[in-house]
Amino acid sequence: MNKNSDKLLFKKNLSLRRKSKQKLIKESFFMLSSSIFITYLNYIIPNKILIFKSFLTNFSKLTSNILNLLPYFYEICLAIFIFVSLIFSFILILGAFYRLMKVITSKTKQISFK
């Protein structure tokens, strides 16, 4: 292949047209209104200073709880793996018996040579 085609691989996907002023105004209005809405949501949250002060203690409690949950999570994943593997092996056994029965009970076609 041509080496120059690698440079222009996604050239057709680029939009080279500039946005209209109307579209730029709509986008800027949407950005401004969403930023005002987010600022308002932050404003109505009570006790912001207390939340920031308790952040580190809450984070340390969370990590200690996660470390306590890891052995249980391992056991849960192991039980799920055992259950899924038993179902999968059961399906494989059924498929194997089905194929064996199909081979055993199949009627042999006699080829007649003329």
Image: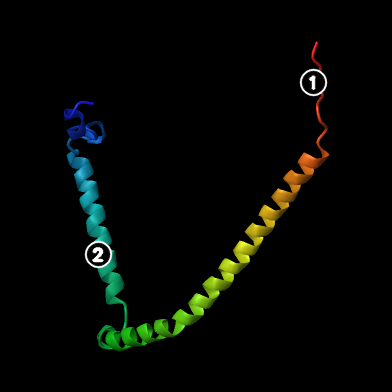
Instruction: Name the image quarter holding the N terminus.
Output: top left
**Is 94 drawn above or below residue 60 in the view shown?**
above
Residue neighbourhood size for the residue with mark 2, other residues' Cα within 10 Å, grouped as few (<14), some (14–19), many (≥20): few
Q: Is residue 23 above or below residue 60?
A: above
Q: Quadrant of the C terminus?
A: top right
Choose between 99 and 58: the one closer to the eye.
99
x 60%, y 63%: residue: 84
Residue found 81% across the figure and 17% down from its top: 112
The residue identified by callout 2 is 36
Pinpoint residue 34: horizontal percent, then vertical percent.
27, 60
Q: Looking at the image, which residue is at 25% across and 88% down? A: 53
Which numbered dot is residue 111? 1
Q: Earlier in the sequence, mark 1 or mark 2?
A: 2
Q: CA distance from mark 1 to mark 2?
A: 84 Å
Horizontal and vertical percent position of residue 88? 63, 58
Question: Can residue 16 be seen?
Answer: no
The image shows residue 55, relative to residue 81, as above or below, that is: below
Residue 86 placement, left or right of 65? right
Q: Percent position (x, y) of residue 48?
A: 27, 83
Extreme residue in the front direction: 113
Q: What's the residue type where badge 2 is placed?
A: Ile
Q: Quadrant of residue 20?
A: top left
Residue type indicated by callout 1: Ile
